[in-house]
Image (tube, rainbow, N blue to C red):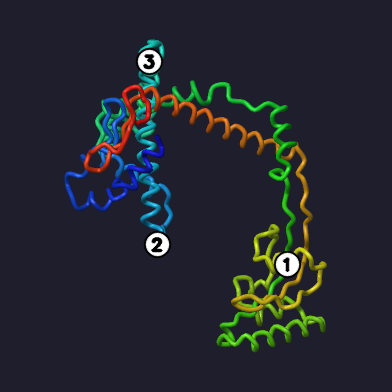
């Protein structure tokens, strides 16, 4: 089903943001149908804008369209899956009346908590008006959120554990994931070609001169402040601990082969020459089980949650009618009433 969502986006839904601004009626275009519940392009747009705002990050212009397409895809998926969870919750509520009574009490409890938080009934009503909500509509929203939560508790979160034996087996089977990488702390002098108008030989000569001075016990930090050109020059060229593999290969190789306190020969690159001195080194190690046990447990529980949720969604897509539409409302593909993909 998620492949159908991606196809729908690529064939037209990804254009909704621009089209919606140009056409007043686009907001009511049907994007998806879950059983008898319709998802419109306006709902997708509202969710997309909320997700963009929530991310709080600026998107480079070159990546903007791709990022927006991805967020639209996620918005459609979320809206469809929310309705699938709600359909399952209604089935459970119908089958177990006690669940409905529990939800009624929880809704009243939440509303009372929000009234107190707002400062009283008048303030709470003002808050609802600011959200363009009615009391009945807001209570229904809370109820639906609780209903979806109950489904997740029942089918995803209930009895979710990772026992000691399972944790130890994971530790033994995945030693590389439990290994602390080798690290090195070092100083660097970078001689850029741009300082010599691109004349590589002049830059090479300058780098060789610095290495010669260092061999005469000149202070590396002082030479870095005077000659280097990077973000660490003011700190005497000092770089804090870094893992193996972070820097380009020639530099990385030198960092992890140099003896402590030794200075490298100039390392040539496209942009200039780099001189290195290793200050401190930490050897890689396999972290003890006790040290990584909480991390392994979190990872395993997250994996199990994901697997259970995927299994739940697979079942719900099969048991419910789900159809993804193009922007104009024409079928882009979907599922039969029994849920079988077409």
The answer to whether 275 appears left or right of 16 in the picture is right
Q: Position of residue 289 (x, y in %)?
A: 75, 37
Quadrant where the N terminus is found in the figure: top left
Whether residues under marks 2 and 3 lie with C-beta atoms below 8 angstroms apart, the answer is: no
Please tell me which residue is depicted at 71% across the width and 43% down the height of the picture: 178
Identified at 38% across, 37% down, the residue is 77
- Tell me if residue 323 comes above or below residue 192 in the rendering: above
Measured in 3D between alpha carbons, the distance from the residue under mark 2 to the one under mark 1, in whole angstroms, is 36 Å
Point out the frontmost of discs 2 and 1. 2
- Residue identified by numbered label 2: 62
Q: Which residue is mark 1?
A: 186
Q: Secondary structure at mark 1?
A: strand
Residue 265 in view: yes
- The answer to which image quadrant residue 278 occupies is bottom right
Give the residue drawn at x 78%, y 49%.
285
Can residue 143 be seen? no
**What residue is disc 3 on?**
93
Q: Looking at the picture, does residue 181 appear above or below residue 235?
A: above
Q: Which image quarter is the C terminus in?
A: top left
Q: Secondary structure at mark 3?
A: helix
Position of residue 246 in the picture relative to residue 131 (left or right):
right
Q: Observer-nearest residue: 223 or 118? A: 223
- Indicate the quadrant where residue 206 lies: bottom right
- Going from the N terminus, do you reach mark 3 or mark 1 first? 3
Q: CA distance from mark 3 to mark 1?
A: 63 Å
């Amino acid at each position: 089903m998620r492949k159908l969502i991606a196809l729908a986006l690529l064939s037209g839904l990804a254009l909704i943001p621009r089209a919606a601004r140009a056409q007043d009626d686009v907001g009511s275009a049907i994007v998806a149908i879950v059983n008898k519940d319709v998802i419109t392009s306006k709902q997708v747009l509202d969710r997309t804008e909320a997700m963009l705002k929530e991310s709080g990050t600026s998107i480079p212009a070159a990546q903007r369209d791709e990022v927006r397409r991805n967020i639209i895809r996620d918005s459609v998926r979320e809206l469809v899956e929310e309705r699938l969870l709600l359909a399952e919750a209604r089935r459970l509520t119908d089958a177990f009346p006690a669940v409905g009574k529990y939800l009624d009490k929880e809704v009243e409890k939440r509303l009372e908590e929000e009234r107190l938080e707002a400062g009283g009934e008048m303030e709470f009503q003002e808050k609802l008006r600011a959200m363009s909500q009615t009391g009945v509509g807001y209570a229904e929203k809370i109820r639906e959120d609780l209903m979806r939560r109950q489904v997740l508790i029942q089918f995803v979160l209930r009895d979710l554990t990772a026992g000691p034996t399972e944790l130890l087996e994971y530790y033994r089977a995945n030693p590389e994931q439990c290994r602390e990488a080798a690290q090195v702390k070092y100083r660097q002098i970078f001689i850029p070609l741009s300082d010599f108008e691109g004349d590589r030989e002049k830059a090479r000569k300058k780098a060789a001169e610095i290495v010669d001075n260092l061999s005469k016990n000149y202070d590396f930090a002082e030479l870095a402040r005077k000659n280097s050109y990077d973000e660490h020059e003011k700190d005497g060229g000092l770089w804090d601990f870094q893992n193996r593999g972070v820097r380009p290969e020639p530099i990385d190789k030198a960092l992890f082969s140099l003896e402590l306190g030794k200075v490298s020969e100039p390392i040539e690159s496209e942009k200039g020459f780099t001189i290195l001195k290793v200050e401190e080194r930490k050897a890689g190690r396999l972290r003890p089980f006790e040290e990584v046990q909480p991390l392994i447990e979190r990872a395993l529980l997250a994996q199990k949650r994901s697997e259970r949720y995927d299994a739940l969604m697979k079942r719900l897509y099969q048991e419910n009618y789900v159809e993804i539409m193009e922007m104009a409302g024409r079928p882009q593909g979907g599922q039969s009433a029994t849920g079988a993909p077409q």
